[in-house]
C-alpha cells in the first residue's frame, strides 16, 4: 500500500466538490463547440452512434481506471505512474505514460485557450447587440472578420490563459471548486432554452434530429471512426492524466463508479443537447453542417438575434461557454503544475507562469493558422488541425490504451478491486473484461484500420 501520509497533496472538500470539478473538466468546448462541428464534418448519425458506443464501452471503463490510479497513488500523474509501477513490480518505462499525459495536456491547452478566447470575445459581441436581427450572411462575416485578425485572437487568447493561470495558482480548494459550483445549473437551463428555440424551426427541427440520430453508415470512414473514438477521450478528459490528478485529490470513501457514471452521463447529455440545438438552425438557414470550427459561432448568434430575449441569452450563453472552457482548461494545466510543485520544488505561482507561458507561446501557432499562416499546411492540415489530430486522435487514445493495459493486466487485480469497491464481484468482472479486452482491442483495431492494415 502506498504511503500517503507524507504528501502535501491536496484533497477535495467533499464528494460533491469532486463531482463538480470533474464534470467541469469533462464538460467544455468539447461538448458545445467541437462535438457539433465534427459531427457535421463526419456525416451525422453514424458518427454519433460510434461516439456513444465509445463513451460507453471505452470511455467509462477507462475513466474508472484513471480515477482509481490517481486515488490509489494520491500523487500527480508522473509520480503516480512511478509509484504504481514499483508497486506492481512492472517495467519502469510505464512511468513515461505520466509524461505523455502532461505534454498532451499542455498541447491541448494551447489551442483550447484560443477557441475559449473566441467564446470570450463573443460575450462582448452579444452585449453590443451585433447579432440583433442579423441574418446568416451577416453573422458569418462577423465571424470571418474576427478570426482574420491575429491581434484580436492573441488578445483574447492571452486573457483566457491568464484567467486559467490565476485559478490554478489558487490551488484546488479555493480556485477550482468555487468556479464550477454555479456553472452546471445555468448551463443546463440555457441548453434547454436553446433546444426550445430549435423546436420553433418547424420541419428543420426534425431534419436536425434526423441528421443526428439516423445513422447512414455509408458516410463512415475509418478516419471518422478514429475521430469519434478520439472525441470520446477528449470529451471525458481521458488519456492524459487530468482525471487521474483529480482522482488523486479524492478521499477513499467515495464510490468511483457512481461518480464516473454521473459525470459521463452529464457530459453526454450536454453534447447531445448542443447538437439538437444547433443542427435545426443550420438547416433553417441553409448553412452547411460541415462548416468546421466556426459552426457554433456562425449558427447560434442567428438564433440569439432572432428570438425574444435573445440579447440576454446570447450574453449568458457565451459567458457560460467561457466558464465551461475555464473549468476544463484548469484541468489541462493542473497535471503539469502539480508535478512542477511536488517534484521540482517550484512554487505554485512559478509553476503556473511556466506552464502557462510555454502553452501561450504554442497557442500562437493556432491563432495564426486561422489567418496569416492559413496556407501553411503539412499533410493538408494547418497547425491547429495538426495539434488537434495529434492530441485528440493519437495521444489520448494511445494514453487511454496504455492506462487500460496497465490497470487490466499489470496492476494487481486485488488493488483495482479494492479501489473500485463495486457492490458485487459481478460488476467488477464486467469492468475487468471491458478494461482488459474490449477497450484496448477497440483502440487497437481502429488504429489498424486507419493505417490501412485492416
Ligand atoms: N473535456 C474537455 C472538453 O470536452 O472540452 C477538454 C479536455 C479537458 C480534454 C481535459 C482533455 C483533458 F484532459
Image (spheres, rainbow, N blue to C red):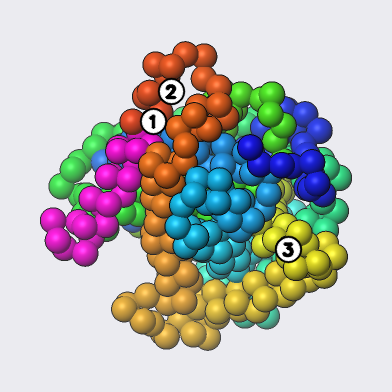
Q: The residue tagged with tag 2: helix, strand or loop?
A: helix
Which label is found at residue 428? 2
Provide the residue span drawn in magenta.
434-454
The answer to whether 382 is drawn above or below residue 18 in the figure is below
Q: Earlier in the sequence, mark 2 or mark 3?
A: 3
Quadrant for the C terminus, please.
bottom left
Q: The residue tagged with tag 3: helix, strand or loop?
A: helix
Q: Main secondary structure of the magenta part?
A: helix
Q: Earlier in the sequence, mark 1 or mark 3?
A: 3
Q: CA distance from mark 1 to mark 3?
A: 32 Å
Q: Is residue 184 left or right of residue 9?
A: left
Q: Check disc 3: other Cα within 10 Å, few if <14, some if 14-19, many if 20+.
A: few
The picture places residue 115, in percent across and down from the top left corner, at 59, 62
Can residue 18 be seen here?
yes
The picture places residue 346, in percent across and down from the top left corner, at 81, 68
Residue at (61% x, 58% y) in the render: 78
Amino acid at each position: 500500500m502506498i504511503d500517503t501520509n507524507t504528501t502535501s497533496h491536496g484533497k477535495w472538500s467533499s464528494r460533491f466538490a469532486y463531482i463538480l470539478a470533474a464534470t467541469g473538466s469533462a464538460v467544455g468546448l468539447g461538448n458545445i463547440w467541437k462535438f457539433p462541428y465534427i459531427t457535421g464534418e463526419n456525416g451525422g448519425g453514424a458518427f454519433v452512434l460510434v461516439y456513444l458506443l465509445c463513451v460507453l464501452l471505452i470511455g467509462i471503463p477507462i475513466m474508472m481506471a484513471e480515477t482509481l490510479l490517481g486515488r490509489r497513488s494520491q500523487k500527480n500523474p508522473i509520480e503516480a505512474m512511478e509509484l504504481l509501477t514499483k508497486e506492481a513490480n512492472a517495467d519502469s518505462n510505464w512511468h513515461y505514460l505520466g509524461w505523455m499525459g502532461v505534454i498532451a495536456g499542455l498541447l491541448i491547452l494551447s489551442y483550447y485557450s484560443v477557441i475559449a478566447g473566441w467564446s470570450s470575445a463573443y460575450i462582448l459581441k452579444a452585449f453590443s447587440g451585433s447579432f440583433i436581427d442579423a441574418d446568416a450572411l451577416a453573422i458569418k462575416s462577423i465571424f470571418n472578420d474576427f478570426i482574420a485578425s491575429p491581434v484580436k485572437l492573441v488578445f483574447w487568447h492571452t486573457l483566457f490563459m491568464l484567467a486559467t493561470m490565476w485559478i490554478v495558482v489558487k490551488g484546488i480548494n479555493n480556485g477550482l471548486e468555487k468556479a464550477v459550483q454555479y456553472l452546471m445549473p445555468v448551463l443546463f437551463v440555457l441548453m434547454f432554452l436553446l433546444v426550445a428555440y430549435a423546436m420553433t424551426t418547424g420541419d428543420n427541427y426534425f431534419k436536425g434530429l434526423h441528421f443526428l440520430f439516423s445513422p447512414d453508415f455509408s458516410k463512415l470512414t475509418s478516419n471518422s471512426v478514429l475521430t469519434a473514438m478520439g472525441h470520446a477521450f477528449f470529451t471525458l478528459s481521458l488519456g492524459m492524466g487530468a482525471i487521474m490528478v483529480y482522482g488523486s485529490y479524492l478521499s477513499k470513501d467515495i464510490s468511483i463508479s457512481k461518480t464516473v457514471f454521473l459525470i459521463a452521463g452529464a457530459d453526454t447529455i450536454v453534447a447531445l443537447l448542443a447538437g439538437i440545438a444547433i443542427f435545426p438552425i443550420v438547416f433553417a438557414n441553409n448553412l452547411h453542417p460541415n462548416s468546421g470550427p466556426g459552426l457554433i459561432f456562425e449558427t447560434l448568434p442567428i438564433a440569439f438575434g432572432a428570438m425574444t430575449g435573445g440579447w440576454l441569452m446570447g450574453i449568458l450563453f457565451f459567458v457560460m461557454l467561457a466558464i465551461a472552457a475555464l473549468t476544463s482548461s484548469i484541468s489541462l494545466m493542473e497535471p503539469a503544475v502539480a508535478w512542477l510543485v511536488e517534484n521540482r520544488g517550484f512554487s505554485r505561482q512559478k509553476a503556473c507562469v511556466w506552464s502557462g507561458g510555454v502553452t501561450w507561446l504554442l497557442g500562437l501557432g493556432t491563432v495564426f493558422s486561422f489567418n496569416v499562416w492559413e496556407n501553411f499546411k503539412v499533410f493538408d492540415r494547418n497547425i491547429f488541425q495538426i495539434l488537434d489530430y495529434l492530441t485528440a486522435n493519437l495521444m489520448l487514445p494511445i494514453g487511454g490504451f496504455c492506462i487500460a493495459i496497465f490497470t487490466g493486466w499489470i496492476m494487481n487485480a486485488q488493488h483495482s478491486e479494492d479501489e473500485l469497491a463495486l457492490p458485487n464481484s459481478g460488476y467488477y468482472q464486467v469492468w475487468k473484461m471491458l478494461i482488459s479486452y474490449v477497450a484496448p482491442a477497440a483502440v487497437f483495431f481502429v488504429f489498424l484500420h486507419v493505417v490501412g492494415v485492416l
